C-alpha cells in the first residue's frame, strides 16, 4: 500500500512538473504586441528587433515592483547606449496611478499600459513582477517571476551575456 502511494505521488509530481514546464516561454519567439506608452505614442515590441529587450510587467500595488523599478532604470541608463532596451508594462486598470509612480520613482525607460491584460496573457503573467529577457533575434531567453534583492545581479549577467552574442 505504501508503495502504491509513493508511486502515485511520483506520477503526480512528474505530471505537475511537465505541466509547469510546458507553460515556460523560454526558447519561444516573443509574442509581438503594440501598446500605448506614457509619452502617448504606441510602441511595438518588434520595432526593437536587433536589441536585447527586457519586458518588465508591473503594477502600482506591487511592493517588489516598486523596489525593483529604480534598479531596472539603472540598467536601462547603463546599457541603453549599447543595444539594450527596457519596456515596463503596467497592468493597472488606471494608468494615472502608474504615471504617478513612474514620476515619483524617476523612471526613464518607456512605460506601456496593458489595462486590458491582453499582453500579460500572451506572456502568461500570473503574478507581479514578471521580467522577460529577449535576445536580438526576438527569442525569449529568460523569464523571472517575482523580485527579491539581488535579482538585478542575475539580470546584469544575463544582459551582458546577450549583448555579447
Image (cartoon, rainbow, N blue to C red):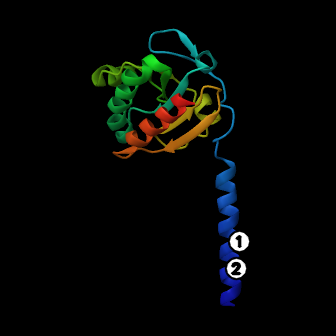
Q: Give the vertical position of 99 relative to 15 (above or below).
A: above
Q: Position of residue 163 (x, y in %)?
A: 52, 28
Query: Along the horizontal axis of the image, is 157 left or right of 11?
Result: left
Badge 1 density bin: few <14, some 14–19, many ≥20, Cα 10 Å = few
Report the residue that reaches farthest toward the left: 104
| Horizontal side of residue 29 vs 159, given as left or right | right
Quarter of the image where one finds residue 77 = top left
Write down the quadrant of residue 100 in the picture.
Answer: top left
Viewport quadrant of the N terminus = bottom right
Q: Position of residue 41 (x, y in %)?
A: 52, 9
Q: Residue 148 or 125: which is nearer the viewer?
A: 148
Q: Is residue 87 above or below residue 40?
A: below
Q: Which residue is mark 2?
A: 7
Residue at the image position 43 percent from the left and 42 percent from the top: 154
Asked whether the residues under the numbered discs 1 and 2 touch, taking CB atoms below 8 Å apart as contact, a structural biologist would say: yes
| Residue 119 as seen in the image, left or right of residue 90 | right
Question: Which residue position holds label 1?
Answer: 11
User: How crowded is the residue under tag 2: few (<14 C-alpha within 10 Å), some, or many (20+)?
Assistant: few
- Kindly identify the residue that appears in the image at 64 percent across and 27 percent down: 138
Report whether residue 97 is seen.
no
Residue found farthest to the bottom: 1
Residue sticking out furthest to the front: 164
Amino acid at each position: 500500500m505504501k508503495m502504491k502511494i509513493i508511486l502515485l505521488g511520483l506520477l503526480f509530481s512528474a505530471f505537475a512538473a511537465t505541466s509547469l514546464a510546458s507553460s515556460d516561454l523560454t526558447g519561444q519567439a516573443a509574442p509581438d504586441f503594440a501598446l500605448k506608452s506614457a509619452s502617448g505614442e504606441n510602441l511595438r515590441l518588434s520595432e526593437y528587433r536587433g536589441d536585447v529587450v527586457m519586458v518588465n510587467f508591473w503594477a502600482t500595488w506591487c511592493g517588489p515592483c516598486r523596489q525593483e523599478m529604480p534598479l531596472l532604470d539603472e540598467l536601462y541608463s547603463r546599457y541603453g547606449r549599447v543595444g539594450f532596451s527596457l519596456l515596463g508594462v503596467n497592468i493597472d486598470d488606471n494608468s494615472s496611478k502608474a504615471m504617478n509612480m513612474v514620476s515619483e520613482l524617476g523612471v526613464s525607460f518607456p512605460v506601456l499600459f496593458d489595462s486590458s491584460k491582453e499582453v500579460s496573457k500572451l506572456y502568461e503573467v500570473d503574478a507581479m513582477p514578471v521580467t522577460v529577457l529577449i535576445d536580438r533575434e526576438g527569442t525569449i531567453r529568460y523569464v523571472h517571476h517575482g523580485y527579491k534583492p539581488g535579482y538585478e545581479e542575475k539580470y546584469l549577467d544575463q544582459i551582458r551575456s546577450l549583448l555579447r552574442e
